[in-house]
């Protein structure tokens, strides 16, 4: 008898009804706009997210900024485990589950309540990162990531994703420069090989090609002001198209 015959089929969302209901169709659907930033370490996501947040606020739009891994007080503690370069023994599967533990907390504590209030939520990385880093580069499979995503995020997906594309060498050079200036570098994942980061970039490019309706590829080479203009053009169109106040 195969394992699938022995195990009873269960609904993985069973027991999580209150949050799942919030995300259901119809009247209870969150009213805000969920925008995520994605890219290699050193692509400039964090800088661009902050510039976009400032610009949206100047226009009177209510914005919540968050980040993965991190985002909440619990998430920051998990982030420390994940990125501490001394944790050499951390397995790929543990890494995946900790990424989603962080995200589950952020979704429930910050992102959903903000969306329910009609805010624009800007998140520095979300599940596309886990697909690219753990699913593809670590080789855990995209299917595995999607399965855990269903549990941890319960159907929440970004309305719009800005993927900041830059070649691997440039991205890593920028990331290493930043780390040299940082007193407590969080480098466990960043310090993977060039081959690893090349897989991550290829995965992002595949994701962008697979989901053109959601993921916009932004050329991240140039000055931060030039990149910010590209981001702003895309976001303005999306905000208009999605009818956000
Ligand atoms: P950050 O520097 O953008 O905060 O990201 C920290 C590191 O975590 C970065 O090397 C990418 C990695 N990461 C994953 O491997 N999987 C994930 O799901 C997320 C959110 C980040």
Image: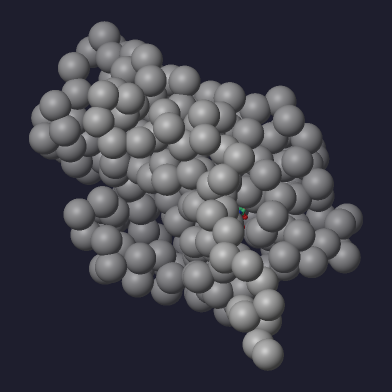
Q: Position of residue 25 (x, y in %)?
A: 28, 36
Residue ID at (33%, 47%):
161
Q: Position of residue 220 (x, y in %)?
A: 34, 52
Res. 181 in view:
no
Q: Quadrant of the N terminus?
A: bottom right
Hey, which quadrant is residue 192 in on the image? bottom right
Residue furthest toward the bottom? Answer: 1
Q: How many marks?
A: 0
In this view, the residue farthest toward the top is 60
Please tell me in which quadrant of the rendered image residue 204 appears: bottom left
Q: Residue at x 52, y 29 (%)?
A: 18
> Is residue 215 something that shows in the picture?
yes
| Image-based side of 206 in relation to 90, left or right | left
Q: Position of residue 83 (x, y in %)?
A: 74, 50
Q: Nearer the viewer, residue 6 or 146?
A: 6
- Left or right: 71 as drawn, with respect to 127: right
Relative side of 111 to 58, left or right: right
Q: Residue at x 26, y 24 (%)?
A: 27
- At 47% from the left and 20% from the top, the residue drawn is 113
Residue 40 located left or right of residue 72: left
Image height of 136 relative to 62, above or below:
below
The picture places residue 132, in percent across and down from the top left corner, at 50, 65
| Quarter of the image with the C terminus in it | top left
Nearest to the observer: residue 19 or residue 7: 7
Above or below: residue 229 compared with residue 32? below
Give the colour scheme shown: one colour
């Amino acid at each position: 008898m195969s394992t699938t015959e022995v195990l009873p089929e269960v609904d993985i969302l069973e027991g999580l009804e209150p949050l799942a209901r919030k995300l259901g169709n119809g009247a209870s659907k969150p009213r805000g706009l969920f925008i995520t930033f994605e890219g290699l370490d050193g692509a400039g996501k964090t800088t661009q997210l902050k510039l976009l947040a400032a610009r949206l606020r100047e226009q009177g739009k209510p914005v919540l900024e968050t980040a993965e891994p991190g985002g909440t007080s619990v998430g920051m503690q998990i982030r420390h485990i994940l990125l501490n370069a001394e944790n050499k023994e951390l397995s790929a599967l543990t890494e995946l589950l900790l990424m989603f533990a962080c995200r589950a907390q952020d979704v429930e504590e910050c992102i959903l309540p903000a969306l329910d209030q009609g805010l624009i939520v800007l998140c520095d990385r979300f599940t596309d990162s886990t697909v690219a880093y753990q699913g593809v580069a670590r080789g855990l499979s995209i299917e595995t990531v999607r399965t855990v995503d269903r549990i941890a995020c319960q159907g929440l997906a970004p309305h719009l994703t800005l993927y900041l594309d830059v070649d691997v060498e440039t991205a890593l050079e920028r990331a290493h420069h930043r780390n040299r200036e940082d007193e407590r570098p969080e480098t466990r994942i960043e310090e993977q090989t060039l081959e690893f980061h090349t897989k991550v970039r290829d995965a992002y490019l595949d994701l962008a090609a697979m989901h053109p309706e959601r993921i916009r590829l932004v050329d991240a080479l140039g000055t931060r002001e030039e990149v910010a203009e590209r981001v702003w053009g895309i976001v303005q169109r999306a905000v208009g198209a999605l009818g956000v106040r």
